Amino acid sequence: MTEANEKVEEEVVYEKKWYIIHTYSGYEKKVAADLEKRIESLDLKDRVFRILVPEEEVLEEKRGKQVKVSRKLFPSYVMIEMLSIKEENELGLGYRVDSDAWYVIRNTNGVTGFVGIGSDPIPLSDEEASNLLAKVGIDVDGEGSAPRLDIDFRIGEVVEVKGGSFDGQQGEIAEIDYEHGKVKVMLEVLGRLTPVEVEYTEIAKIDY
């Protein structure tokens, strides 16, 4: 039996991994849209899965009102989920992307390159990818979720209601709904403490 026959072929391990590509400033959404069209037309959907411009919803004051607006988390960067081959290299354990998919992405208008070493893309760790996806309201399995609002209050904090029927009343926060921006405050109603739901923009911290 020859040495070649004795050698056991290693099993190829494929994993979905998230990568970051760099784009010209302001081209993030155009690059994402162009990539989606090219991936579909070139039949690469089995190697390139999700393409995402990381954005978060924040509240901004416009004309005296708080409105939700989208803000890019990382200007000039686009996240892309690709099929990768798990392998050992000179740096230890690594991942290699499909060469055809790499070529298509790298040569899309507006793309300046992958984040990595030289021309070799380096994927995000699972923890990094999960944290980024959570920020934009997507879980690791790809299901969408409502954005978590940045509410700067805590349960047990005493606040004052601004506006409405309970204007000027103070009470303790009993519950916070980060998804919908609602807060339940314990207020005195008809002589007894009652949880009253208000918008988090309708309460204010108390300066002692």
Image (cartoon, rainbow, N blue to C red):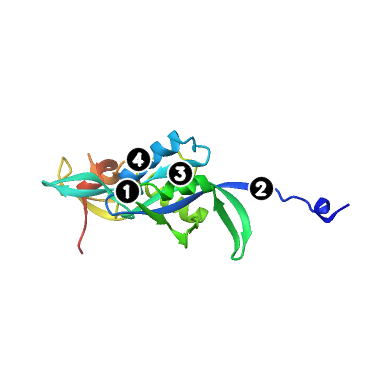
Residue at screen point 39% across, 42% down: 35
Disc number lying in front (3 or 4): 4
Residue at screen point 78% across, 51% down: 8
Name the disc covering residue 59, or none.
none
Name the disc covering residue 33, or none.
4
Q: In the drawing, does residue 145 fall left or right of residue 181?
A: right
Q: In terms of depth relative to the viewer, which is nearer, 182 or 88?
A: 88
Q: In the drawing, does residue 9 fall left or right of residue 65?
A: right
Mark 1, Cα crowd under 10 Å, few <14 / some 14-19 / many 20+, is many
Quadrant of the image for the C terminus? Answer: bottom left
Mark 3, Cα crowd under 10 Å, few <14 / some 14-19 / many 20+, is some
Name the disc covering residue 139, or none.
3
| Residue 60 drawn at (x, y percent) | 20, 49
- The mark nearer the N terminus, 2 or 4, is 2
Q: Which residue is mark 1?
A: 28
Q: Are marks 2 and 4 in contact (CB under 8 Å)?
A: no
| Residue 199 drawn at (x, y percent) | 24, 43
Disc number lying in front (3 or 2): 2
Q: CA distance from mark 2 to mark 1?
A: 33 Å
SS class of the residue under badge 3? loop
- The mark nearer the N terminus, 1 or 4, is 1
Q: CA distance from mark 3 to mark 2?
A: 27 Å
Name the disc covering residue 12, or none.
2
